[in-house]
Image (tube, coloured by chain):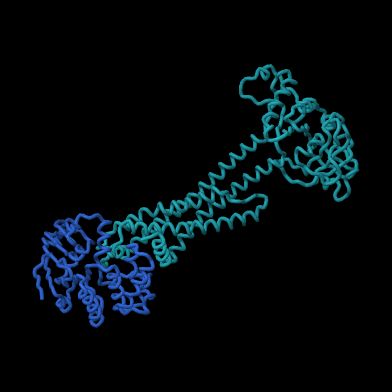
Chain colours: A cyan, B blue
Amino acid sequence: MNLADVLRFSFASLAGARTRTLLMVLAMSIGVAAVVVLTSLGEGARGYVVGQFSSLGTNLVIVFPGRSETTGNPGMLLGETPRDLTLDDALTLTRSRAIRRIAPLTVGSALVTTHRRNRETPVLGSTAEMLEIRHMSMGQGRFLPGGDPRQATPVCVLGAKVKAELFGTRQAVGEWLRIGDRRFRVIGVLASQGQSMGFDTDELVIIPVASAQILFNTSSLFRILVEARSREDIARARSDTEEILAKRHDGERDVTVITQDAVLATFDRILRALTLAVAGIAAISLAVAGILIMNVMLIAVSQRRQEIGLLKAIGAAPAQIRALFFAEAAVLSSAGAMAGLVLGMAGSYIVGRIYPVLPLMPPWWAVVAAFGTALVTGILFSVAPARRASRLDPVESLARH
Amino acid sequence: MIRLEGIQRVFQVGDQEVRALRDINLSIGAGEYLSLMGPSGSGKSTLLNLIGLLDRPSAGLYRLDERDVTGLSDEEQAQVRREKIGFVFQFFHLIPRLSAAANIELPLLLAGVPADQRKSRVSRLIEGFGLTGRDTHRPDQLSGGQRQRVAIARATVMNPAVILADEPTGNLDRATGQEVMNILEGLAARGVTLILVTHDPEIGNRATRKLRMVDGKIVADQRT
């Protein structure tokens, strides 16, 4: 008996019990579809987060003042606060050959006033390099001017939303406004970008870093964004940064340097674990479908006792009977898996239409795993029924009860 | 060709032992036409199943074509059944979802005969058994006589040396029964060993050798 014959025979017996077949295919396909949809949701979330991180900039190294340490720090005992990160610190970093450019950041919140309206807004002090490092783009006008960052020029760039709230549809570029107690001229409006990792650039006002330091009366920086020359240079940029700053801070390593890569990798791991967990839960429904198949196959064995007895009488060996029942389960579960894949793809597509920000695409490994699990459970759970069938006593099963 | 020596078959029913066959000694030559008669419960079907290797004796020796088949494994016995034995049952035992042709084809399928050979052998039988035009019909679309003819065609498609028929006319009216008997006797005339279980004396007496069983023993062995 060759494979084609076995399969033809199984198809015929599945077609002979249409309702039963359809129900089992349905159960199997729901399990597979669940795995596909849930993993594509998880992968979508991961892709979303990774995308958000990349929109923050590429090859970024971020420096912040202070150092979190769990070991005893004598400085803490002596009541010494960590040294501030200054603009000069930031500017020295450009000496490293691994670093392409840097953007110092000062952050504060101030009341922004035009002659008609006012609004409390986060204010970001930075330099011209910020535009490139953060991958922002201009809607109108220009960004902060280059030149010496120590110079406090009274100009500002508005986020798209701030502009809309303060000026409405009127022209903003060239107008003067008041931030805190100082006057600034609007030289540009950012293109609307939406949220990126909690930093809504649409709601920001950006001014030169020196102006911000005067405005907020501080000499320290909130962050320094460092862009390495290339991906390979990230590690060097990081160690150079630590080196240079330690030298400037009398050998004290009192800053924290993180790389975007490390943060990205962490998020990536967390979300992948989440996806796996969700896939695992979905896989349970596959196992349930497998048990259902076993159940129905067992019923089929007792319903088809006469047929099995007859097959034995006309010379079917036990192995052949097992093969027939196996093939039936395999055909069933692969049909279910196939239907499930189609269903899952359709489901992912629909969810993707509802949440267009998520890049929904079931990962290939999930598709393979779902298909494989469906087949394996289907076949595994048909072992018992197939064995039972092959062990039936032909005389008894042929007898009319 | 068939030799049974000291065959016993004991069934365990609850805590009672039922001795269905007691010390059967029988030898059947190739091409014999033999009927097994006796009251129900006399063990004639058990004996038939034993000869057909559907059942194993509790004790004794069974030789088929000079080969001891008592100790064969399930797989080996299946092969012997496939190649040497054809069964005809009272209730036909056709597979309801398969067409007449597909039912006849089944033993060839199990034996792994290539598809093109299967087709020609099946169509020859369909013609020979007067089933032309019925080959695509399913069993429930056939009359009783036609069903039994399909079943006999299935039993002969592998050209077995022995045909075992258990009450082949038991479920048919007299005329169709007659028709089926003619077919079976036609096979016997061509040299197939035919063993017939029946309790209809009119049919049983047509055989050239008549065995009578009572209480698991052969009480009469009559040749004409």
In x, y percent, where is residue B177?
24, 79
Q: Position of residue A331 (x, y in %)?
A: 44, 59
| Image-based side of A134 in relation to A155, left or right | left
Q: Residue at the location (9% across, 70% down)? A: B220
Q: Is residue A303 among what the camera can see?
A: no
Instruction: From the viewer's perspective, tell me whether residue B40 is left or right of residue A294.
Output: left
- Quadrant for residue B34, please give it: bottom left
User: Quick one: B48 or A115, which is closer to the camera?
Assistant: B48
Q: State left or right for residue B179 relative to residue B98.
A: left
Residue occupying the point 14% across, 59% down: B8
Looking at the rendered image, the quarter that the C terminus of chain B falls into is: bottom left
In screen coordinates, is A111 left or right of B194? right
In the image, residue A24 sits, relative to residue A212, either above or below, namely below
Q: Is residue B189 visible?
A: yes
Quarter of the N terminus of chain B within the rendering: bottom left
Q: Is residue A9 above or below residue A150?
A: below
Q: Nearer the viewer, residue B185 or A288?
A: B185
Residue A401: image x %, image y %? 27, 67
Task: Please tell me how many numbered marks the rendered image carries.
Answer: 0
Please determine whether, in this image, residue A173 is positioned above or below residue A30.
above
Q: Residue at x 50, y 52 (%)?
A: A371
Residue A267 lies, in percent from the top left, at: 62, 39
